[in-house]
Image (tube, helix red, strand yellow):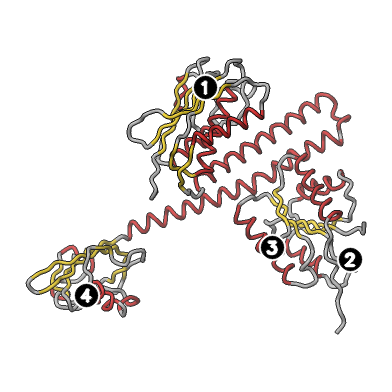
Amino acid sequence: MKSRNILLVEDNPDDEALTLRALRKNKILNKVTVAHDGAEALEVLFADGSGGEPPPGLILLDLKLPKIDGLEVLRRLRDDERTQLIPVVVLTSSKLDEDIIASYRNGANGYVRKPVKFAEFAEAVSTLGMFWLLLNEAAPPFVHHQV
Amino acid sequence: MVCVDADGRIVLVNTQMMRLFGYPREELEGQLVEMLVPDAARAVHPQRRTGYMADPVPRPMGAGMQLAARRRDGSTFPAEISLSAIDTDEGTLVTAAVRDVTERQRRQDDLERAVRNLETFTYSVAHDLRAPLRALGGFTAALLEDCWDGLGEVGQGYAERIKAASEQMATLIDDLLHLSRLSRAEMNLHAVDLGAEASRIAEELKRGGPGRGVRFVIQRPVWALADTPLIRMVLQNLLDNAWKFTSRRDDALIEFGVTPVENARVCCYVRDNGAGFDPAYVGKLFNPFQRLHTTQEFPGTGVGLASVRLIVERHAGHAWAEGAVGEGATFYFTLSAKESA
């Protein structure tokens, strides 16, 4: 497996630690970059050629974020050809219908409500990692064509 | 009340109208009624007026529209206007009864704001309360997994209790959200065979607990006008309860049927011969999170009967219970929803 990065967009340090622990516990050892708000997420994704980081193979996106919220991050990702095809799974506390609908409408590939029970939370994170990083055939990374 | 002739000229006003609009009588009578119409609607009004003259049946003006009227000082107020016509020697006159609904409008705005606030509150319960709870449960689980030996037996016990309590609270929050959604859920009324629904639930219960020798007696068909998913929830809750509270009986019997009742379209009951309850607490039975047994005796969070009452009341019905300790319980509910409701 080509080791693709995960971008975790999460403002809550507890959820961040629990997600990272769940990934580690489930032997998902892909590199995880954490962005703590929507603006930072966009910086990480659109920092052109600076760090030479390849685009992530999976984005786990919380909805309620400081500065730029999750839905806006999603819209901007889908508007840009460099990030248009990256799988984005919304990982949030809300299970309000309007949030679910808005997420899909803005191009989310999945929507998972963070379970409160840790065992279920760990399983959800592990299932997401397994499916999106191992099983799912992602679109090839975007390549800039010289004109 | 203001009376207008076929040309739209005011022929008669009562004192209430003069007070409402701030005009003396002589400034109104003989003038075009459009002087009472706000600027925005004045241009179209003569046309509407002629339209009404052609078919002068009594009706509210501008059905479904937000109407306003204009006072002498140019200010406007939200108005409700009903129209009717009278035939006189001088031809047809149209009378318009104008009511100032400012106060009602204000109360409605207040109410809508309160509902919006409540929805915001629900959202913050959904989102903000769950996050710390997840941390509580998650780190306790981490503590148990990663630091098991260091905790020692006493520490492990405490950590287990924290974990269990946080999970219990998570269930309570979910139940609360569930109730608030029930009270807002959209209703689609159809004819439903409650007997068939009850039978299906009974089959599921029997499949889920093959060791139990429960006898079900279910009347069929029992037709009622109801929202299918919601009424299923009522039956599910009542039959689940009956199943649960008969768990200590070998000769468990659960019945579903209808009983004659006045002032309702249909009255159903679910009866069991299980643990029953102390009739002294019958008034509390349908309150959210009210339990009459400890979780050790019978599990549950006490949200089932609260949902039942909520759903039944949304069907213009009532729910009540009869029972005695050790002698089983009977839960009744009526449904009176009408097609147009």
Quickly name the residue at label 3. Answer: A67
Tell me which corner region of the image, top left, top right, bottom left or bottom right, holds residue A118.
top right
Q: Are marks 1 and 3 on the same chain?
A: no
- SS at badge 2: loop
Say the numbered circle drawn on residue A53. 2
The residue beneath circle 1 is: B272
User: Disc 2 to disc 1, how far (Cα)?
Assistant: 66 Å
Most foreground residue, B21 or B280: B280
Give me the C-alpha separation between circle 1 and circle 3: 57 Å
Q: Is residue A139 above or below residue B238?
A: below
Q: Amino acid at mark 1?
A: Asp
Contact (Cβ within 8 Å) of mark 1 with mark 3: no
Mark 2 or 3: the one toward you = 2
* x and y, in percent, of residue B277 in the image: 51, 20
Which kind of residue does numbered mark 3 sit on?
Answer: Lys
Seen from the viewer's position, the closer of residues B314 and B166 is B314
Is residue B73 visible in the rendered image? The answer is: no
Judging by the rendered image, the residue that carries numbered circle 4 is B33
